[in-house]
Amino acid sequence: MVPPSSLVETGTTIRIATTVNSQFVEIDIDSRASLLDMLRERLGFTGTKKGCDHGQCGACTVHVDGRTALSCLTLAAKANGRTVTTIEGVAAGDTLHAMQRAFIDHDALQCGYCTPGQVMSAIACVRQRQATSKDSIREFMSGNICRCGAYVGIVAAIEAAASEMQEG
């Protein structure tokens, strides 16, 4: 099988074309680079956080084609031809996404380090219709770890944003 021309390795780098936060991007990257490193270090989207770097804390959660992805465990090459959304891409200009606003309104953050990943997972929780009860929200969000213990506020924020997101 012949790989698409955009994925042919040229030494240790490959060229990929992707859309990040509604912006088309073509970039040469190390073929072993993670999506997290490409987003933070090459494209400057530093809202996505590097936590454990082992896919266990959820701080690096982004959306790839609308589905959650742990960007520390995803090769950047897998973003070729796909749409990536980071925390910087969920607001509409100066207007926060309903989930971002709900996190603020419900004090769902303490240190805030995990908040971008929590918000990205929370949006997916509602979109996938898993925000039906506190228990189902907790189960869906179990891959996101908050070391400060803001879980009560996070669940309250998701419940509050769910009705607004499902209406809109």
Image (cartoon, rainbow, N blue to C red):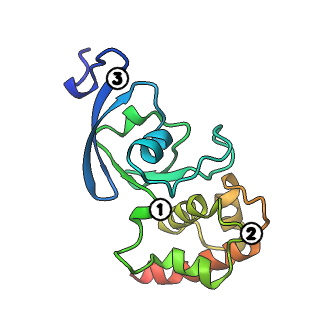
Label annotation for residue 67? none
Mark 1 or mark 3: which is in front?
Answer: 3
Label annotation for residue 13? 3
Most foreground residue, 30 or 161: 30
Instruction: Specify which label sits upstream in the sequence, 3 or 2.
Output: 3
Residue type (three-letter) at the residue carrying disc 1: Ile
Q: Position of residue 2 (x, y in %)?
A: 23, 16
Question: Could you tell whether 76 is left or right of 135 in the image?
Answer: left
SS of the residue at dot 3?
strand
Mark 1 or mark 2: which is in front?
Answer: 1
Mark 3 or mark 2: which is in front?
Answer: 3
Question: Circle 2 is placed at which residue position?
Answer: 151
Within the image, what quadrant is residue 117 found in? bottom right
Instruction: Specify which label sits upstream in the sequence, 1 or 3.
Output: 3
Q: Position of residue 78 (x, y in %)?
A: 39, 35
Residue type (three-letter) at the residue carrying disc 3: Thr
Residue type (three-letter) at the residue carrying disc 2: Tyr
Q: Position of residue 124 (x, y in %)?
A: 51, 62
Q: Classify 10 Å Cα crowding around label 3: few (below 14), some (14-19), many (20 and above).
A: some
Mark 1 → mark 2, Cα distance in angstroms: 19 Å
Q: Position of residue 86 (x, y in %)?
A: 44, 57
Residue 78 vertical position relative to residue 145 in the rendered view, above or below: above
Residue 159 vertical position relative to residue 73 in the rendered view, above or below: below
Within the image, what quadrant is residue 159 found in? bottom right
Q: Which of the image's four quarters has the C terminus?
A: bottom left
Within the image, what quadrant is residue 130 found in? bottom right
What residue appears at the point 40 percent right and 72 percent down from the top-left corner?
Answer: 91
Label annotation for residue 87? 1
Q: Classify 10 Å Cα crowding around label 1: few (below 14), some (14-19), many (20 and above).
A: many
